[in-house]
Image: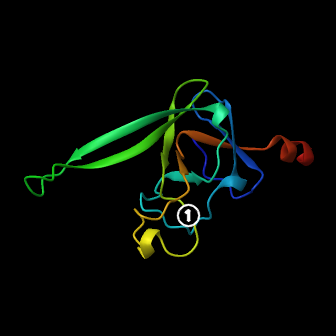
Amino acid sequence: MASAPASSSSASYRCAACGADLNLSAAQLYPAGVFFEAGNKGTLSFAWVDESRLRFAAEDRIRPFFETRNYWGIQRKRTRVSCDACGRLLGHVYDDGPPVMQGHGQLGMGPSQVIPRRPRYRIKTKAVVAAPSPAAAAHGK
């Protein structure tokens, strides 16, 4: 059973299926009050991950949505994130993080589709287990 997100910045996260160290730290989590377009329910949102411990696979979905004769779907691109050791799905990468640039978007427009954004690594809370970092565990003894 997965544990609740750790509030300490010294906690690290492991794969819930195989126990592999994912090198995910609570220090890389986005603050709890940050709003994301894709939501944040049941997930942990990381600003950075160690890509050597994870597998990435592009996922391109077309959801049927028939509004007019010429408009036939909503295209959603995202990347699947899996544990490199066992292959379990951990979450997805979304591009709805904080803006890369300051000020107005391209040509002074403001919608989020125009403003380039940082990636957000959205990891499911059921897919990872919080564990104290080795430094915190050694210090506690």
Above or below residue 93? Residue 86 is: above
Residue 77 percent across, percent down from the top left: 38, 45
Q: Quadrant of the C terminus?
A: top right
Give the residue displayed 42% in from the left and 57% down from the top.
38
Above or below residue 69? Residue 32 is: below
Numbered disc total: 1
Secondary structure under tag 1 reads loop
Describe residue 28's horizontal placement relative to residue 121 as left or right.
Answer: right
Question: Outermost residue toward the top?
Answer: 86
- Residue 4 or 94: which is nearer the viewer? 94
Residue 113 in sight from this viewpoint: yes
- Residue 104 or 44: which is nearer the viewer? 104
Give the residue displayed 11% in from the left and 52% down from the top.
70
Above or below residue 29? Residue 34 is: below
Disc 1 marks which residue? 98
Residue 103 percent across, percent down from the top left: 55, 75
Question: Outermost residue toward the left?
Answer: 69
Residue 89 percent across, percent down from the top left: 49, 34
Give the residue displayed 90% in from the left and 42% down from the top.
138
Residue 1 in sight from this viewpoint: no
- Residue 48 or 5: which is nearer the viewer? 48
Callout 1: 10 Å neighbours few (<14), some, many (20+)? some
Describe residue 124's horizontal placement relative to residue 72 as left or right.
Answer: right
Give the residue displayed 64% in from the left and 56% down from the top.
29
Above or below residue 71? Residue 79 is: above
Q: Amino acid at mark 1?
A: Pro
Residue 7 percent across, percent down from the top left: 69, 58
